[in-house]
Image (cartoon, rainbow, N blue to C red):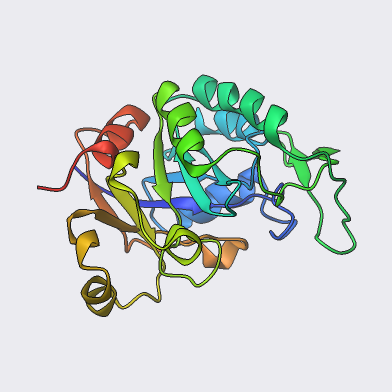
Amino acid sequence: MRIAYDFHIHSGLSPCSCDDMSPNNIINMALLKGLDAIAITDHNSTLNLGAFQQLSINKNLLIVPGVEVTTKEEVHLLCLFESFNNAKGFQYIIDSTLPKINNSKSFFGNQLIYDHMDQVVDKYPLLLISALSLTVEEVVAEVSNLKGVVIPAHIDRKSYSILSNLGFISPNLKITTVEITTNCNISSFQEKHKYLRNYRKIINSDAHSLVDILERESYLEVKDLSCESIINELKSFVI
């Protein structure tokens, strides 16, 4: 089946995101835009996934649990999981590798934790846009152990991407899917990086505000509408 997706959305837990990026607002906007599946990918945290999990029970929208990790090399990686429990397992790894630097909300923004009623129940104290002490290779290994998939984020950008910071994608990582931005000229990008032709390329919004969430414009063929099917497809090689 063919599904419309947006696998890169930040809630108000990400300091660079709008405070109205609450669970109900995000889900309802995604439904209004006709999406079948979305992923919540806050910077270095899964702590808002519980509210999304609770809300998804009664919504005609699949929530894929995820996180956007900043590696030791300051590379952004999308990490998506088959289950909320596996994503929560990754939170323990984040907690042990995130630098103990306090967030300055006046400079970086709020880091809001919501309940399923969109009430702010806490504010995360440590700065979530810091780089973890894990390398790209180590993140891939940890996520693989939790049956997840790693997708290098916005690889066509000039900062915080695996190409801008490392120059290439090592075949040892066994990456099969990469993310490009909505502004990417795919033909010229592939001409410049010919070895990337065989990688699956997905386009997400990287939404930090409600209006940025994608319409029905990015599609993925999957066996069925489930996190497991989506992860399996994103892990598979392009034929």
Can residue 225 be seen from the camera position used here? no
Can residue 90 be seen from the camera position used here? yes
Give the residue furthest to the left.
239
Q: Residue 59, image x and y in percent?
A: 48, 36
Q: Is residue 53 left or right of residue 34?
A: right
Name the residue at 81% across, 59% down.
109
213 and 177: which one is in front? 177
**What quarter of the picture does the N terminus occupy?**
top left
Q: Residue 171, image x and y in percent?
A: 28, 46
Q: Which image quadrant for residue 133? A: top right
11 and 238: which one is in front? 238
154 and 4: which one is in front? 154
Q: Residue 201, image x and y in percent?
A: 28, 57
Name the residue at 90% across, 62% down.
106
Q: Is residue 52 left or right of residue 34?
A: right
Name the residue at 51% across, 33% down.
56
Q: How many marks?
A: 0
Q: Residue 82, image x and y in percent?
A: 40, 27
Name the residue at 44% across, 36% down.
140
216 over 135 or under it: above or below? below
